């Protein structure tokens, strides 16, 4: 019997739905058992979010500062053959509950020596976060063997509007009846079942080498190059804002509300006016930088970790 542990954090349930579909083929196999464990932050992050609490999560996300979570109720003697981590992205970073788990002693005992597959359910900017996650998995002793990313395919600004509406209302519905449905499309979520057979085969053979190449052939990772460039630029600015806000205190500290509001206005300005400009300049220069940029993309779609810059 092969045993899989799925550790996930999903506020709306979208992430749970994705990972269930990814593993559907394994769940019906008689020789495979799957245990699902949700990461539970203490106190829970409100869903729907209230305006200031949404922005208040930014500094700790970006700086990978852990919060509090309930201990995962796993049997310490259980020897899992595969660990699957499902997570959303918060502010170009891993969500605080995942960071908290990955930096815990629990993570060290669960992940040590184990193959790990990450499954991301994002808007469209996940590259920076996955680099942080690669590093934390390695620090906990795990071996990243695969990564699957589902994202919202709508145009960047449209998906910002719809995701904010979704996050602030908890309604995965069309904003004003004119915008598209927020988040990852039902079609993409349904089609995530295509990843199951290759994961199942790797698990049954206990051979995870080459798994990511097989997943990539099934389009497990897709990029819009200008979106990647935008997030790489933005993450540097987020780091500066996070340090600036943290000088005023930790989560919930009213003294930092002014700076959080400044970040919020900066972000709306950047999304509306700067990011289209970044995209335009990117595509003008793209023919000259294509080779170097594509090399970066090949790295981001893989499961190795370049320590420099981390
Ligand atoms: C506080 C917050 C910040 C977010 N920032 C990003 C982001 O930087 N990049 C991105 O692709 N998605 C971002 N999202 C969207 C999430 O990746 C995810 O799609 C959404 O939260 C639904 O996930 P869940 O319901 O499974 O938790 C953000 C969501 C929240 C709540």
Image (cartoon, helix red, strand yellow):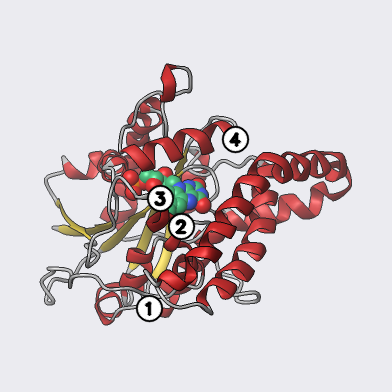
- Residue at x 61% of width, y 42% of height: 223
- How far is disc 4 from disc 1 in space, using C-alphas? 38 Å
- Residue at x 83% of width, y 43% of height: 281
Classify residue 22 by image quadrant.
Answer: top left
**Tag 3 secondary structure:** helix
Residue under circle 2? Answer: 55
| Mark 2 vs 4, N-terminal side | 2
Viewer can see residue 120? no
Q: Quadrant of the C terminus?
A: bottom right
Residue under circle 3? Answer: 51
Residue under circle 4? Answer: 157
| Mark 3 vs 1, N-terminal side | 3
Neighbour tally class for label 2: few under 14, some 14-19, many 20 plus, Cα within 10 Å? some
Picture coordinates of residue 86, whole percent (x, y) = 34, 54
Picture coordinates of residue 215, whole percent (x, y) = 46, 45
| Viewer-nearest residue: 86 or 89 | 89
| Mark 1 vs 2, N-terminal side | 2
- How far is disc 3 from disc 1 in space, using C-alphas? 37 Å
- How far is disc 4 from disc 3 in space, using C-alphas? 19 Å
């Amino acid at each position: 019997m092969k045993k899989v542990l799925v550790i996930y954090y999903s506020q709306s349930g979208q992430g749970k739905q994705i990972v269930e579909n990814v593993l559907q083929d394994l769940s019906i196999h008689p020789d495979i058992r799957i245990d699902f464990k949700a990461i539970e932050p203490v106190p829970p992050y409100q869903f729907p979010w209230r305006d200031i609490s949404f922005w208040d999560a930014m500094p700790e996300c970006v700086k990978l500062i852990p919060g509090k979570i309930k201990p995962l109720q796993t049997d310490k003697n259980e020897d899992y053959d595969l660990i699957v981590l499902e997570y959303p992205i918060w502010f170009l970073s891993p969500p605080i509950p995942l960071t908290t788990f990955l930096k815990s002693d629990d993570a060290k005992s669960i992940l040590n020596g184990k193959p790990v597959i990450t499954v991301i359910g994002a808007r469209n900017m996940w590259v920076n976060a996955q680099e942080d996650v690669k590093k934390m998995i390695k620090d906990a002793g795990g071996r990243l063997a695969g990564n699957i990313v589902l994202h919202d395919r709508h145009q960047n600004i449209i998906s910002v509007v719809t995701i904010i509406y979704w996050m602030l209302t908890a309604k995965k519905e069309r904003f004003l009846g004119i915008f598209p449905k927020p988040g990852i499309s039902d079609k993409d979520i349904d089609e995530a079942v295509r990843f199951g057979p290759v994961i199942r085969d790797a698990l049954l053979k206990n051979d995870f080498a080459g798994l990511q190449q097989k997943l990539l052939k099934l389009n497990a990772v897709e990029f819009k190059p200008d979106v990647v460039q935008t997030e790489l630029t933005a993450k540097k600015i987020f780091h500066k804002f996070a340090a600036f806000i943290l000088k005023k205190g930790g989560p919930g500290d009213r003294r930092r509300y002014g700076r959080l509001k400044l970040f919020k206005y900066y972000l709306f300005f950047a999304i509306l006016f700067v990011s289209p400009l970044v995209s335009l300049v990117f595509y003008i220069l793209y023919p000259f930088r294509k080779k170097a940029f594509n090399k970066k993309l090949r790295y981001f779609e893989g499961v190795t970790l370049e320590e420099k810059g981390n």
